[in-house]
Amino acid sequence: MFGFGTLFYVSLLLVNAIAVLHEERFLARIGLSQTGFQMQPGGVDPTSIKHKLINLISAVRTLLRFPLVLLNIVVIVYELILGGS
């Protein structure tokens, strides 16, 4: 039922969902754009949850782009060859 493979698929889908968020179309509308957050008057509080969330989204979109492509290819090939459950 719920095993390591399912947990891996769920985490891969969540990271994919974060990676495909468009900064101007979606993130800026809800106030999670990195450029909009840096331009706020009064400075930026680096300990705030919003600031940490913006940094996490930015890091996922920047650092995990190529590993995500490779992981997605591996999962697709695995599903095509062995079939899913």
Image: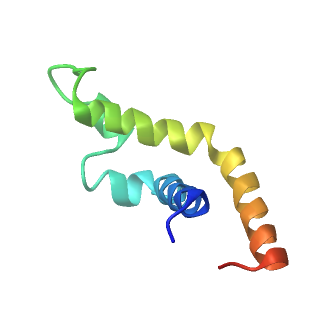
To which quarter of the image does residue 35 belong? top left
Q: Position of residue 83 (x, y in %)?
A: 75, 80
Q: How is the image coloured?
A: rainbow
Q: Is residue 64 above or below residue 84?
A: above
Q: Position of residue 65 (x, y in %)?
A: 64, 47
Tell which of 81 and 27 is nearer to you. 81
The image quadrant where one finds the C terminus is: bottom right
Q: Residue furthest left?
A: 42
User: How many marks are shown on the rendered structure?
Assistant: 0
Residue at the image position 27 percent from the left and 56 percent from the top: 29
Q: Is residue 71 left or right of residue 39?
A: right
Q: Is residue 36 above or below residue 19?
A: above
Q: Is residue 59 left or right of residue 31?
A: right
To which quarter of the image does residue 6 belong? bottom right
Tell which of 65 and 8 is nearer to you. 8
Q: Position of residue 51 (x, y in %)?
A: 29, 31
Q: Is residue 7 above or below residue 31?
A: below
Residue at the image position 58 percent from the left and 56 percent from the top: 4
Residue at the image position 38 percent from the left and 60 percent from the top: 25
Q: Residue furthest right?
A: 81
Q: Is residue 48 left or right of residue 82?
A: left
